[in-house]
Image: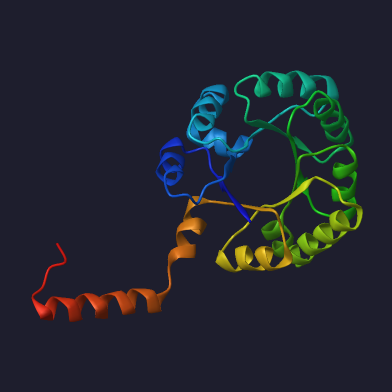
Amino acid sequence: MKFFVDSADVAEIKSLAGTGLMDGVTTNPSLIAKSGRKMSEVIAEICALTEGPVSAEVTAADLDTMLREGRYLRDIAPNVAVKVPLTEAGLRACKALSDEGTMVNVTLCFSAPQALLAAKAGAAFISPFIGRLDDIGEDGIQLIADVVTIYSNYNFRTEVLAASIRHPVHVLQCAKIGAHVATMPPAVIKALVKHPLTDRGLEQFTADWAKTGQSIL
């Protein structure tokens, strides 16, 4: 499973870039807005930190403007994946941009039929949202499972990019199901490292070693 960082905080992304735990980055208009910076500048800096895909999202609702924005964003760097919403205009934009050789990430997916349409439109990635479905009493993980099954049935090349991940259990569930990618905030990636027994064991090993009075070096 590939790990994407869901953030527009360049400092956080730079910190994670050297860990080997980051295979790409996803952003959205809300994350860019929090940065307080110009989108093109943020995306360019992020793209320089990773060779993996960096999702940059259009903000238009109509097809013509989506295409203009998408072409502008893809010209920022060769590893930009243009992110479009799962609307009719978004699917049309996905088809047009994909036909031009652009990576497209279709976002705001909340049903398996929507995911099927995105694959047929040539999306490189589909982003089903887990947490937001859980918030309204639906099963976000089941959506991931359904999409993985459907794509496998028909050998679609679209990768399932599990989004709206809230905690490490979501990551584990997605990995067991076979999602290709999980995108998550830096805090969730860091939480994957933590386990109280690891901390307790390290404390014991350190204490025992200190009693010997030895030094490895």
Horizontal and vertical percent position of residue 190: 45, 58
Residue name at image x 88 percent, y 37 percent? 121
| Quarter of the view holding residue 180 | bottom right
Figure quadrant of the N terminus: bottom right
Q: Is residue 136 visible?
A: no
Is residue 160 placed above or below 193 in the rendered structure? above
Is residue 106 placed above or below 169 in the rendered structure? above
Horizontal and vertical percent position of residue 134: 71, 64
| Quarter of the view holding residue 215 | bottom left
- Tell me how many marks there are: 0
| Residue that extends furthest to the left in the rendered view of this protein | 213
- Figure coloring: rainbow
Figure quadrant of the C terminus: bottom left
| Quarter of the view holding residue 135 | bottom right
Q: Is residue 27 visible?
A: yes
Residue name at image x 59 percent, y 69 percent? 169
- Depth check: give the residue in front, 36 or 64: 64
Residue name at image x 91 percent, y 53 percent? 154
Is residue 60 placed above or below 188 in the rendered structure? above
- Depth check: give the residue in front, 165 or 1: 1
Is residue 200 placed above or below 97 in the rendered structure? below
Horizontal and vertical percent position of residue 212: 11, 80
Horizontal and vertical percent position of residue 44: 53, 25
